[in-house]
Image (tube, rainbow, N blue to C red):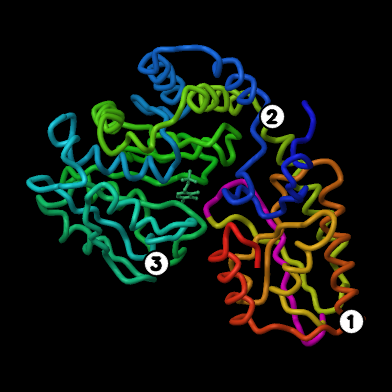
Amino acid sequence: MGEDPRQRLKLRRIINAAGTMTIFGASAAVPEAVRAASEILPLFVEIDDLQRHASGAIAAATGAEAGYVTASSSAAITLAIAATMTGSDLERIARLPNATGMRDGVVIQRGHLIDYGAPIEQAIRLAGARVSPVGGTKRAEPSQPEGMLDDTIAAALYVVSHHTEQSGQIPLDDFVRICARRKVPVIVDAASEYDLRGFIAAGADIAIYSAHKFLGGLTAGIVAGRKDLVRAAYLQNGGIGRGMKVGKEGIAGAIAALEAWAKRDHAAHRRQEEARIALWMRELVDIPGLRAELSPDPTMNPITRVRLQVDPAIAAITAWNLADALVEGERPIMVRDDEVAHGYFELDPCNLSGSEAEEVAAGIIRERRRAGIERRPASSFAEWSAKRLATRLAWPDRN
Ligand SMILES: *Cc1c(COP(=O)(O)O)cnc(C)c1O
């Protein structure tokens, strides 16, 4: 390890109890990926050959016929959809996002229209495609997509994520069967999933993974799937994919991360995370106004988090003000606060090291105690989110 650059760059040394979040730098890249990236950066290579090698590594890891690496999972969604619209027709590829004369519909369940930092619906439209939502937010029937799969439909997108509506969605197996009957390719967005083989095995034509989340590669997206579609997606680099391309370091990093993933002692990793969870459950009982409970990952990823319910009447602080208090001070603690309006946040063990889990528990106990003593006025959720929005809109200034 070289020196920590954060001081020089005036960056705070955050503790990431939020999980694999892009805004906090996604994940700690694994040493294998860091080495592969730094070794290749000063060299010239034939990118087609490097991507050909990546294709083999992705095929080995996923069971797919082929694969390639692009800038991000979001880019992978746009480019996989473009592939289903253009095939390998170079004239069409150059013409996108003008989709005149092409199939341009993308069927997606309404409960899958998520926002992962940006709306997925926009990643679809970026290709020049049209979003064809099916079902209600909380209920979709297999007969609904079936009726829509006519010859204007280029692809069907299936999202596996904790962001999706979890109830009332069509199971992947059924979705694949319906689409296969109409010969509509199914693209699975599995950006944040551990299971590298299951979606291809279930019949997905393309599965998309993030290289920079659990895999610990550099920032990149992985497209795995049917060879003709992967080729057509790769060819978009001569079209709309130009601005979404990945460099040699990202490709080499993704290959190394996939190889490291295959060798990793996943059980030992899991035990380490379970120990952090046990510590939180132990330390955070009996804190007035806080209730800690286990929160298993909704998509079957092997992660458990701790959900901390905050009762402001007893804790003397709201969930959102507590999350804010944790971010102040010498070692800011980032928690998963996307559902803080419901009165809780979550602690994620996967990106912690050393004694950080203890520091998280100590920080929560300290800030709760301080709230009890100082009795600062609470802000309403509306005030809190207005302030957060104002901060966002002020960048690069600080408000
Ligand atoms: C993170 C995520 C994305 C976006 O991934 P990037 O690689 O950051 O573009 C897309 N879909 C899902 C389900 C995600 O979790």
Q: How crowded is mark 2: few (under 14 residues within 10 Å), some or many (20 or more)?
A: few
Name the amino acid, label 1. Answer: Glu
Task: Give the quadrant of residue 354.
Answer: top right
Give the secondary structure at mark 2.
loop
Asked if residue 365 lies left or right of residue 27, the reply is right
Residue that mark 1 sits on: 374
- Look at 66% across and 27% down and name the residue there: 264
Cα distance in 3D space between marks 3 and 1: 45 Å
Q: Residues within 10 Å of mark 1 (few under 14, many from 20)?
A: few
Is residue 123 rendered magenta in the image? no
As drawn, 330 above or below 321: above
- 133 is higher (above) or lower (below) than 310: above
Give the residue number, with chain letter if any, for mark 3: 168
Q: For the point 27% across and 63% down, which residue is it?
A: 133
Tell me the quadrant of the picture where the N terminus can be found: top right
Residue that sits furthest to the left in the current view: 101
Which of pointers 3 and 1 lies earlier in the amino acid sequence?
Answer: 3
Magenta region: 299-315
State the mark number for residue 265. 2
Residue placed most toward the observer, 194 or 345:
345
Q: Which picture quadrant has residue 246?
A: top left
Residue type, label 3? Gly
Which marked residue is nearer to the observer: mark 1 or mark 2?
Answer: 1
